[in-house]
Image (tube, rainbow, N blue to C red):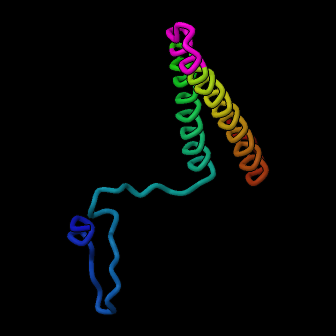
């Protein structure tokens, strides 16, 4: 809160505004390719995390030593990671489809 107040510019009408250039935030034009790029990056990160959790679940399954509680925990990790990967892939596909429809072209 202190940092935000420190960088804030106050006006006479008692509204507080922050100038992005004073705190080092670059100005980026908002275009369809920018939005597609940001969303693609987000979905790649989410998909990578799902794959990482699948590897963790597989390691848990291998090291469970037939303990029913550990086997169940490992299976749940694998199931949730697979669901996360499917959701990320479907989300990516839906976003690409919508951006393609809005701009009239398909982005890759």
The answer to whether 86 is drawn above or below residue 30 in the figure is above
Horizontal and vertical percent position of residue 38? 54, 45
Residue beneath the point at 56% across and 21% down: 69
The answer to whether 80 is drawn above or below residue 11 in the figure is above
Q: Residue furthest bottom?
A: 13
Relative to 29, 84 lies left or right: right
Residue beneath the point at 37% across and 55% down: 26
The answer to whether 10 is drawn above or below residue 13 in the figure is above
Horizontal and vertical percent position of residue 22? 27, 64
The answer to whether 102 is drawn above or below residue 67 in the figure is below
Q: Nearer the viewer, residue 9 or 65?
A: 65
Q: Is residue 63 magenta?
A: yes
- Highlighted magenta segment, given as a residue range: 60-71
Location of the C terminus (image quadrant)? top right
Residue 36: image quadrant is top right
Residue beneath the point at 63% across and 51% down: 32
Location of the N terminus (image quadrant)? bottom left
Count of labels in the image: 0
Q: Nearer the viewer, residue 71 or 52?
A: 71
Horizontal and vertical percent position of residue 70? 54, 19
Q: Is residue 82 magenta?
A: no
Horizontal and vertical percent position of residue 40? 59, 39
Residue beneath the point at 61% across and 28% down: 81
């Amino acid at each position: 809160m202190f940092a935000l107040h420190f960088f804030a510019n106050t006006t006479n009408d008692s509204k507080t505004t922050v100038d992005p250039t004073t705190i080092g935030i670059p100005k980026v034009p908002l275009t369809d390719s920018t939005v597609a790029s940001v969303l693609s990056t987000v979905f790649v990160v989410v998909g990578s995390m799902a794959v990482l959790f699948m590897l963790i679940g597989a390691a848990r399954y291998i090291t469970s030593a037939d303990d029913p509680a550990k086997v169940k925990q490992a299976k749940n990790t694998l199931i949730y990671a697979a669901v996360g990967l499917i959701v990320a892939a479907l989300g990516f596909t839906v976003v690409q489809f919508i951006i393609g429809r809005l701009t009239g072209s398909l982005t890759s």
